[in-house]
Image (spheres, rainbow, N blue to C red):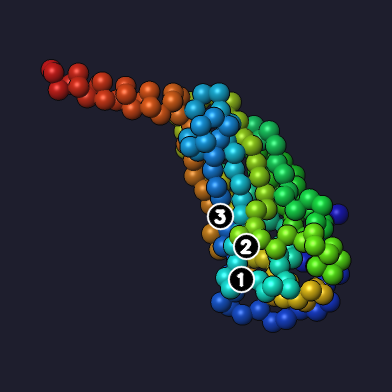
């Protein structure tokens, strides 16, 4: 059973200011040339990160999120989620979510222990990488694929002991493309077609 509470062992909560924002964003690569365009034989590599403004204090760091979901659109259901990894595994309480029949990933949670409980092991990166996915299309028919994680709110520790602030979430969507042939070959084909039309 999942809990909606941010972190049960937190000492106290400090009132959040509206200017505190956690911006969620995706980085798209692939298992081929890394350009993020999914060509025959390639899988998409998707990395979800969050950055914090203002930055977390030196004695603080990323604390956690409420459970959220990664929802796909476009061609997302026309492939396979080969791997999904909660990158805070080993740093607190984590959940890689439940995969539904449309490849949506439901109920992801990131909770990280404060520095007091894991001396020197707490991930204080800003931005911080939180979740990764490897996705392979069923075929390489051309299509656009969209993902959105909704920009969940985040909790940021303000000190060594576990006091925290709420940062409101923003952003969180990404679009990438599946193409039937390498981009260079496709561009060459379009160029050849244009040249043929000019001759006529």
Circle 1 packing at 10 Å, graded few (<14), some (14-19), many (20+), is some
Quarter of the image with the C terminus is: top left
Q: Are marks 3 and 1 in contact (CB under 8 Å)?
A: no
Q: Which mark is residue 55?
A: 1
Is residue 141 found left or right of 70 in the rendered image?
Answer: left
Q: Which mark is residue 25?
A: 3
Where is mark 2, residue-wise? 126
Percent across and percent down for residue 102 are 64, 38
Please say if the residues under marks 2 and 1 sit with CB atoms less than 8 Å apart.
yes
Can residue 194 be seen from the camera position used here? yes
Q: Secondary structure at mark 2?
A: loop
Residue closest to the eye, 58 or 46: 58
Please give the name of the residue rendered at 71% of the width and 67% of the height, measured from the top-left corner. 61
Q: Tag 1 or tag 3, which sits nearer the N-term?
A: 3
Q: Counting residues from the N terminus, which is met first, the one under dot 3 or under dot 2?
A: 3
Q: Residue at x 72, y 44 (%)?
A: 85
Give the residue displayed 74% in from the left and 57% down from the top: 110
Disc number for residue 19? none
Residue 173 drawn at (x, y percent): 53, 52
Does 89 appear above or below 79?
Answer: below
Q: Earlier in the sequence, mark 2 or mark 1?
A: 1
Query: Do the residues under discs 3 and 2 have CB atoms within 8 angstroms?
Result: no
Q: Give the percent coordinates (x, y) of residue 199.
A: 13, 18
Corner quadrant of residue 179? top left
x and y percent of residue 116 in the render?
84, 70
């Amino acid at each position: 059973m999942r809990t909606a509470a941010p972190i049960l062992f937190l000492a106290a909560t400090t009132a959040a200011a509206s200017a505190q924002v956690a911006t969620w964003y995706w980085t798209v690569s692939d298992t081929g040339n890394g350009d993020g365009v999914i060509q025959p034989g390639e899988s998409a590599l998707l990395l979800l990160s969050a950055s914090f403004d203002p930055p977390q204090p030196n004695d603080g760091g990323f604390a956690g999120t409420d459970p959220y979901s990664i929802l796909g659109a476009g061609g997302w259901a026309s492939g396979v989620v080969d791997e999904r990894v909660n990158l805070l595994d080993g740093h607190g309480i984590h959940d890689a979510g439940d995969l539904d029949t449309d490849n949506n990933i439901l109920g992801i949670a990131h909770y990280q222990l404060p520095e007091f409980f894991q001396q020197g092991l707490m991930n204080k990166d800003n931005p911080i990488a939180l979740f990764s996915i490897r996705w392979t299309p069923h075929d390489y028919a051309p299509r656009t694929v969209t993902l959105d994680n909704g920009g969940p709110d985040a909790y940021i520790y303000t000190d060594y002991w576990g006091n925290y602030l709420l940062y409101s979430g923003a952003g969180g969507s990404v679009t990438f493309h599946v193409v039937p042939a390498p981009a260079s070959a496709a561009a060459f084909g379009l160029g050849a077609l244009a040249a043929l039309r000019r001759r006529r």
